[in-house]
Image (tube, rainbow, N blue to C red):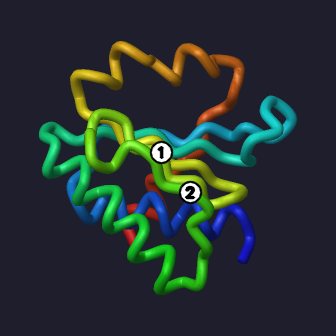
Amino acid sequence: MRERDILTTVAKAADSKRAEDIIALNMKGISLIADYFLICHGNSDKQVQAIAREIKEQAAEEGIFVKRLEGFDEARWILIDLGDVVAHVFHKDERGYYNLERLWGDAPTEDLVSELNQ
């Protein structure tokens, strides 16, 4: 599966659980960690966990291996490593504090509107 297809799967899963402010950063040539970072947030611990759980379940259905999932129990910042795509699911309060969008400000954003509206 191509990394863009993985990104689309992850974005749709997050959107289905009403994740807010979903942003994808194209990390190609910027980071060796992944080709894309998907960043989103939920407004409560339960919603953050529901978003992460849905991403994991949708990935499994598509045959995408989740290499690592961290922070699930705390539900403040859940990191889901899918290889070429790393999803960062924040609690609303934590997202502004860590501000990954600014930290990786030189990374271009990817347009996910057409994928999320399908």
Judge whether 68 appears above or below 45 on screen: below
Q: Earlier in the sequence, mark 1 or mark 2?
A: 2
Q: Amino acid at mark 1?
A: Leu
Q: Residue 90 shows which numbered tag?
A: none
Q: Secondary structure at mark 2?
A: strand
Q: Residue 106 lies in what quarter of the image?
A: top right
Can residue 102 be seen in this snapshot? yes
Q: How far apart are the alpha carbons under marks 1 and 2?
A: 8 Å
Viewer-proximal residue among 18 and 112: 18
- Per the image, the residue denoted by label 1 is 79
Viewer-proximal residue among 68 and 116: 68
Q: Secondary structure at mark 1?
A: strand
Left or right of 13: which side holds 61? right
Q: Amino acid at mark 2?
A: Arg
Mark 1 or mark 2, whichever is nearer to me:
2
* Contact, mark 1 vs mark 2 (Cβ under 8 Å): yes
Percent across and percent down for residue 105 are: 62, 17
| Quadrant in which the C terminus appears | bottom left
| Quadrant in which the N terminus appears | bottom right
Kindly identify the residue that appears in the image at 60 percent across and 35 percent down.
109
Kindly identify the residue that appears in the image at 59 percent across and 84 percent down.
63
Q: Residue extending furthest right?
A: 29
- Per the image, the residue denoted by label 2 is 68
Can residue 22 be seen in this snapshot? no
Left or right of 58: which side holds 53? left
Disc 2 packing (10 Å; few <14; some 14–19; many ≥20): few
Kindly identify the residue that appears in the image at 78 percent across and 33 percent down.
31
Kindly identify the residue that appears in the image at 59 percent across and 42 percent down.
37
Percent across and percent down for residue 60 are: 49, 80
